Amino acid sequence: MVNGPLTRRNLLLAITAASVLPNTALAEAFVDLEWEDLLPEGQAFVPNVLRGLIPHDEQSLASQQPQSSGVRTDWNGQIVRLPGFIVPIEYSGTGVSAFILVPFVGACVHVPPPPANQLVFVTTEKPYESKGLYEPVNVIGMFGTSSMRTQLAEIGYALSADRIEPYT
């Protein structure tokens, strides 16, 4: 495999090597993240069963976003894979070219958004033909911290997607 830091050049070398070597070589080309990994040490993760139970009324959902207790910089500049659901922000043709990756269905749309450290702003050069809000996906690409606000929520991370695929 490739020695040294995981740069885009090294990633291309790893992918090239993976096409010649067994499939296990490609698995080493990115870091698998879970949503809990994005939380600062000691911060509790909201279990799936409790998501969506936050009461809301006529206020905008963005105004009900809980405060974030910070972000982690451990994976800045690294290639990661993170599963989640797409909340579209921008389209190119019929595909989504910018979106918020969220940890659970309906976040930012049907229920208040989670804290900023549980939201990732994703951009992609090749628009993804999304099957809708209920389709789970894996997003693979360059990851980093970010501080941005959309009409839906404040966002703590960004990911430049090289690949978006259905979650399996």
Image (cartoon, helix red, strand yellow):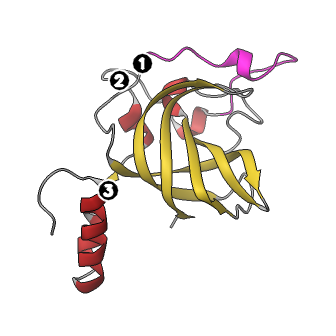
Mark 3 vs 2, N-terminal side? 3
Query: Which residue bears the numbered disc 1?
Result: 70
Read off the magenta span.
52-69
Q: In the structure shown, which secondary structural element does the residue marked by tag 1 occupy? A: loop
Residue 2 position within the rendered picture, expressed as x and y whole percent measured from the top left: 15, 65
Q: Quadrant of the N terminus?
A: bottom left
**Residue drawn 50% across the image and 53% down it:** 161
Q: Indicate which label's residue lies in the foreground, 3 or 2.
A: 3
* Mark identifier at residue 8: 3
Q: Is 113 left, or right, of 28 in this rendering?
A: right
Seen from the viewer's position, the closer of residues 67 and 129 is 129
Q: CA distance from mark 1 to mark 2?
A: 6 Å
Task: Kindly identify the amino acid type of the residue bearing the numbered disc 2.
Answer: Pro
Residue 160 position within the rendered picture, expressed as x and y whole percent measured from the top left: 49, 48
**Residue drawn 70% across the image and 61% down it:** 130
Q: In the structure shown, which secondary structural element does the residue marked by tag 2 occupy? A: loop
Any part of residue 84 in sight: yes
Task: Kindly identify the amino acid type of the residue bearing the numbered disc 3.
Answer: Arg
Residue closest to the far left: 3
Task: Give above or below for 123 relative to 158.
Answer: below
Seen from the viewer's position, the closer of residues 18 and 93 is 93
Q: In the structure shown, which secondary structural element does the residue marked by tag 3 occupy? A: helix
Query: Which residue bears the numbered disc 2?
Result: 40
Residue 42 position within the rendered picture, expressed as x and y whole percent measured from the top left: 32, 20
